[in-house]
Image: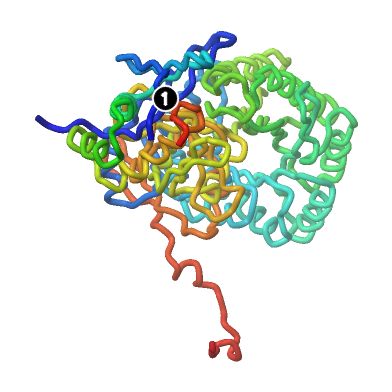
Amino acid sequence: MKIRKNIAVSDTGFLFNPSTGDSYSVNPIGMDIVRLMKQNKELNEIKQAIMSEYVCDEATFEKDYYDFSMVLRNYKLLEDE
Amino acid sequence: MSKKIYERPIIRPLNTGMMNKFGTRTEYLPVTHLDGVSVKSLIKQYGSPLFVFSERQMRENIRNAKRTFETRYPKVQFAWSYKTNYLNAICNVFHQEGSWAEVVSRFEYDKALSNGVPGDKILFNGPDKTDDDLRLAIKNNSPIHIDHLDELYRLTEIATELNVKPRVAIRVNMDTGIYPMWDRFGFNYETGQAWDAINKILASGKLDLVGLHTHIGTYMLTPSAYGVAANKMADLALGIKKKFEATIQYIDMGGGFASQNTLKGSYLKGSDVVPAINEYAEVICTALLNAGFKNNELPTLYLETGRALIDNAGFLLGTVIANKRLSDGRKATILDFGVNILFTAFWYDHKISPAQEFGMHTEDTVLYGPLCMNIDVIRENISLPPLNAGDQVVVHHTGAYTITQSMQFISMRPAVVMIDETGKPHVIKKKETLKDLEMNEKMPEHLHQFKLT
């Protein structure tokens, strides 16, 4: 899953979609994930990166990651696959 | 380097539109302790979900209410409304503070007696009193508040048979300018039903009419309605004095004062719209004092307020079971307590706080209970920080009617704990067990055995 190239990501927790004009606020973990997705990282790499930084087990993160990805897709922030 | 605390990733669209004059989130402070006792330790020791009552808050509420009325009116008597919460420990806190008992059924009456309340300090209300109930109340000299003519006639017959003169009051309903008007209980003031009942009682000479009782509604947000009611009650009492030379000893204004819960559909939060108890006291006491009673004939003011004295002293602690995403994209959180123990969720938007620290981001969420029933919704929409399975929450203002209206359904009812004034928790009701549930069940002989293939 990749974030669309035209999505602007701020350092302070905002996403902006210039093609629709929509803005979004994202919490810090969400921002970490979005940045890693922007770098074209795969799930395993993202998981390792998050788990090395936060107190979290693998199952919880995977569950939350898929839910988060689904919301990103609903907001049309992901590249079509 | 230590790792950071994990929080579920969330994203929410920023909507432009009309400014919200109330601003954004302001009320979401974590509630980690109740009366100095940690929420986590309570759940660890007594299980989840768990009802918790603050004895300190209850005593503060009743003392404040008494002070508020007694500084405005010379003769005031509170009676604890058993139906609001009849756990014995709760009742006894109010009895220790000087409250009598107000009951609406035989089992509540028996509870008050077994708690040690003298019979003459139990106000017996309600439309359902059997002949046996009436005989017991007469024997104990309890004031019987008559609800309908059938009760009046039966009581007159019993009094004749026993050759005693029971102490009675009549319940009066009236138009106080509020909607809906409660006219199903008692005798109506405007249509003359109340006078009809009074005439019957005083003309027969079989019953001792000592009081007048009203209860104009519940969760009343308009204090002025109590002023109207007090004026009409005083008018009846003065009319009785004039017509029959009989002195009414007490006027019972019932209850119905609102707590700070937020009603569903309310634009503003309960804490912003609910009148303070002194606003009710001011209109009631002013009306009675100015009604024209002679100084030595001023009736005692009885008050049966329940909700306003207990609601904010009760909390329900619970735990997040799971999170899921609904088909329309909304977040849903499943908690381990349902509407079977939080019946008030049907009419209140309860304030719910996380019991642990969290970040600044929130998410709109539906809160469901654990029952396998579609109606089990605790909040249709609430903005909460991302809660993970195992996180705990505190539901506020659950002291009134939650315990008495809770039902055993799908899951067992939880334990109830009271934190005393020194901060020590006491179990005041144990968690239900399957044994409790099946205690009164009987199995016919032919149904004992079966064979499945």
**Residue at the spot 51% in from the left edge and 19% down from the top edge:** B68
> Can see residue B453?
yes
Name the amino acid type tagged 1: Arg
Which residue is identified by label 1?
A4
In the drawing, does residue B211 fall left or right of residue B194?
left
Q: Where B42 sits versus A7, above or below?
A: below
In the drawing, does residue B31 fall left or right of residue B422?
right
In the drawing, does residue B403 fall left or right of residue A58?
right
A41 or B211, nearer to the observer: A41
**Residue at the spot 80% in from the left edge and 55% down from the top edge:** B154
A58 or B173, nearer to the observer: A58
**Residue at the spot 54% in from the left edge and 12% down from the top edge:** B16
Residue B200 is situated, as x and y percent measured from the top left of the image, at 87, 42
Q: Report in which chain the residue with disc 1 lies.
A: A
Residue B96 is situated, as x and y percent measured from the top left of the image, at 42, 39
Residue B249 is situated, as x and y percent measured from the top left of the image, at 67, 32
Residue B331 is situated, as x and y percent measured from the top left of the image, at 49, 37
Q: Where B216 sits versus B226, above or below?
A: below
**Residue at the spot 39% in from the left edge and 41% down from the top edge:** A66
In the drawing, does residue B135 fall left or right of residue B16?
right
* Screen quadrant of the C terminus of chain B: bottom right
